[in-house]
Image (tube, grey):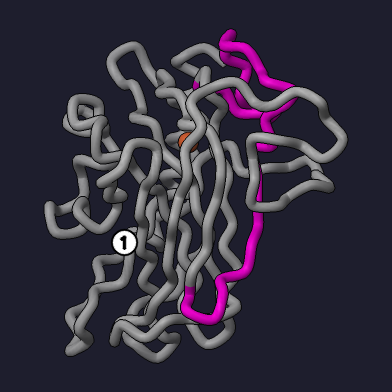
């Protein structure tokens, strides 16, 4: 997809997800819910048998995915800080070259047949989840707009507001400073969307879900 078409595709999803952009309402809860972000045009459309936590190796393949291996150590909690067990945590992302294995992504960057690209795992007893994956590449959506590396997440649990969002990496400050999506978030929300890293290759990420009755409009992603 050339940058212009990519911009069009992104625009379409921006319009479609307007309902998810409703500002969060103030609450007495100790934690603000993780800010929503658009699903984007590249949500997986082809069924995939292997959706386990290790995206660097597809079942039955000999070769591993190309790119820098990273680990995501996450936790799902509610707005009072209590862990949420058995939330479904879904991750999809571009490969190391910034290309999605998706028919709408016709960029000339190479596909990686050994990259899993999509994973769904339940959170554990303490709300914890982990992913082993590769750091996604940045990709152009227009001549003057390059998306910073990001992971797309969808998190659901009955009784809670479903969340679709994007996680960023703390080292990508330059691309984050010019990203149209990231820059329209207020600083306090930006902080919640950037993972933390105190060890090379290991990123910590907290996902905070609001209960259905917490006054935030449900998203339509
Ligand atoms: Fe994306």
Q: From the top left corner, tell me how far across and down residue 75 is, in percent.
A: 42, 68
Residue bearing the label numbered 1: 35
Report whether 98 appears left or right of 180: right
Q: Main secondary structure of the magenta part?
A: loop
> Which residues are drawn in magenta?
98-127
Which class describes the residues within 10 Å of circle 1: few (<14), some (14-19), or many (20+)?
many
Q: Residue at x 19, y 25 (%)?
A: 174
Q: Is residue 221 visible?
A: no
Q: In the orientation shown, which residue stands out farthest toward the front? A: 199
Q: From the top left corner, tell me how far across and down residue 148 is, in percent.
A: 34, 30
Q: Quadrant of residue 165?
A: bottom left
Q: Report helix, strand or loop for mark 1.
A: loop
Q: In the orientation shown, which residue stands out farthest toward the top? A: 108
Report whether 167 appears left or right of 186: right
Q: Quadrant of residue 125?
A: bottom right
Report whether 184 appears left or right of 204: left
Q: Residue at x 60, y 78 (%)?
A: 86
């Amino acid at each position: 997809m050339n940058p212009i078409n990519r911009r069009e595709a992104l625009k379409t999803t921006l319009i479609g997800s307007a309902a998810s952009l409703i500002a969060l309402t103030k609450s007495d809860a100790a934690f603000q819910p993780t800010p929503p972000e658009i699903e984007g045009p590249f949500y997986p459309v082809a069924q995939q048998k292997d959706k386990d936590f290790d995206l660097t190796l597809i079942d039955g393949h000999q070769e591993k995915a190309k790119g820098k291996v990273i680990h995501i150590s996450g936790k799902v909690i509610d707005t009072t800080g209590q862990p949420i067990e058995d939330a479904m945590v879904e991750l999809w992302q571009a490969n190391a070259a910034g290309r999605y294995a998706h028919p709408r992504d016709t960029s000339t960057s190479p596909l990686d047949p050994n990259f899993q690209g999509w994973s769904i795992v339940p959170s554990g007893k303490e709300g914890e989840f982990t992913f082993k994956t590769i750091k996604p590449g940045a990709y152009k959506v227009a001549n003057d707009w390059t998306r910073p590396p990001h992971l797309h997440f969808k998190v659901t649990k009955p009784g809670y507001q479903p969340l679709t969002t994007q996680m960023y990496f703390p080292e990508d400050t330059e691309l984050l400073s010019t990203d149209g999506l990231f820059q329209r978030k207020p600083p306090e929300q930006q902080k919640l969307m950037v993972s933390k890293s105190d060890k090379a290759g290991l990123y910590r990420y907290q996902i905070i879900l609001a209960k259905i009755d917490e006054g935030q409009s449900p998203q339509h992603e």
